[in-house]
Image (tube, grey):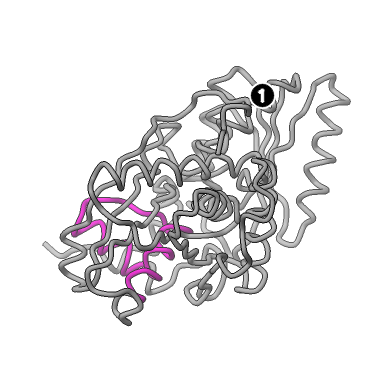
Amino acid sequence: MNLSPFPRVKLGHFPTPLEPLDRLSELLGGPRIFIKRDDCTGLATGGNKTRKLEFLMADALAKGADTVLTQGAIQSNHARQTAAAAAKLGLKCRILLESRIDNPTTEYLQSGNVQLDHLLGAPTRVYPEGTDMNRAMQEAADEVRHDGGTPYVIPGGGSNAIGALGYVECALELLVQGNSMGIRIDHVVHATGSAGTQAGLVAGFEGCRSGIPVLGIGVRAARPTQEENVYREARETAALLGMHDAVARERVIANCDYVGPGYGVPTDGMLEALTLLARTEGILLDPVYTGKGMAGLVDLVRKKHFRQGQNIVFVHTGGSAGLFGYTSAFAASSPKW
C-alpha cells in the first residue's frame, strides 16, 4: 500500500501518541483501553481532519486554487481545521455552516469553533437545517469565480477518497505503534459521522489484511445509512490505492444507538463519558463526536461486548474547542468545594 504517489502538504504532528488509559480501564473492569491521540495533531487545537487536509490541501494547490470552501455544522471541527490549514498555506477560506440543532444558545452560535474560524480569518455564512449544502457550496464557488478567484470545494468533514487517505495512513501508523509497544490491537473504536475517518481506517486495515475490526459509534445517521456511506467511501478509497474489492461489506460496522435526540444534542451518556475521561485521565473529549463515541465504548464495556484481556484502541478525533459552545450543558456536573 503506497501513499507516496499522492500530493501532500505537511500540516500536522505525526505520529500522534498511542497511550494506555489504565485508570479508566481499571475503573470499568473490562478490556485494556488505549487512546490514539489525534487530538494532538497540532493544527489550531488539532483533530482528525488535519490528516485529511494534508492530502486535500495538496490537491487544492496542485489545481491552482486560491480559495477553499467547505461546510459543516455550526460548531464544526472540520471547518476550524480547514480555516487553519488555509491560513498556514496562504489561501483564502470561506465556510458554510448549517444550523442543525433547535434553539441554539448564544455561546453555541458565537463561541468555540465559530470564534476560532473568525480568528483564523475565515468568514462564515449560516444556512437553515435541511439546506442542500452541496448545492450551496457550488453556488459559493461560483461567487469566488465571479470575483476572479479559483475555488476548491472540500466536502463536509473532508470526507472523500482523497481525504480518507489520511486515515489509511493512521491505520498503518497504529500497526507500527502496536508492534513497537508489543500489543495486539483487537478492536479500534471511534466516533463516526461524515464517514471519511472510518472509511480510511477500514481501507487501511483491510488493505494490509490486518484483521483488526473497526467499530464506528454513530453521531448522526441511522445505522443502515451510516454503514452504506462508510462502505461506499471505503471502497472508493481502496480503489484509489489500486486495491479493488479489498473491503468486504461485513467489515463495515456502525453502532448508532448513542446518537440520542439528534446530532449535536447532549446526552446523559455523553456527559458521563466526557466527565469520566477528564477526571480519570486528564483528557478532554468533545460533546458532539468523541463524547458520544466514548459513551458508546463505556457502555459496551459494561455490557461485556469486549472480552477481558483484549486491547481496545479508541481514536480521539479531537474537537475539545467545541466544549466552549456547550458550557451550559455541563453546569450540573460542576464539582462542589
**Can you give x and y, in whole percent of width and height, for residue 22 in the image?**
17, 58
Under mark 1, the amino acid is Lys
What residue do we see at 54% from left, 51% from top?
Answer: 197
- Which residue is situated farthest in the left direction here? 337
**Can you give x and y, in whole percent of width and height, for residue 125 in the image?**
69, 42
Horizontal side, residue 29 vs residue 94: left or right: left
Q: Specify whether residue 75 is in view.
A: no
Label 1, on which residue?
Answer: 92
State the image quarter where residue 153 is shown: top right
Q: Give whichever of 330, 70 is nearer the camera.
A: 70
Q: Give whichever of 34, 123 is nearer the camera.
A: 34
Q: Residues within 10 Å of mark 1 (few under 14, many from 20)?
A: some
Q: Give whichever of 179, 333 is nearer the camera.
A: 179
State the image quarter where residue 329 is shown: bottom left
- Does the segment drawn in magenta span residue 293? yes
What secondary structure is found at the residue carrying circle 1? strand
Q: Specify whether residue 77 is in view.
A: yes
What residue do we see at 57% from left, 59% from top?
Answer: 193
The stretch of residues the image draws in magenta is: 271-300
Q: Is residue 199 shown above or below 213?
A: above
**Can you give x and y, in whole percent of width and height, for residue 67 in the image?**
71, 25
Q: Is residue 21 shown above or below 102?
A: above
Q: Is residue 113 shown above or below 192?
A: above
Question: Which of the image's four quarters has the N terminus?
Answer: top right
What residue do we see at 65% from left, 33% from top?
Answer: 123
* Main SS class of the magenta portion in the image: helix
Horizontal side, residue 224 vs residue 253: left or right: right
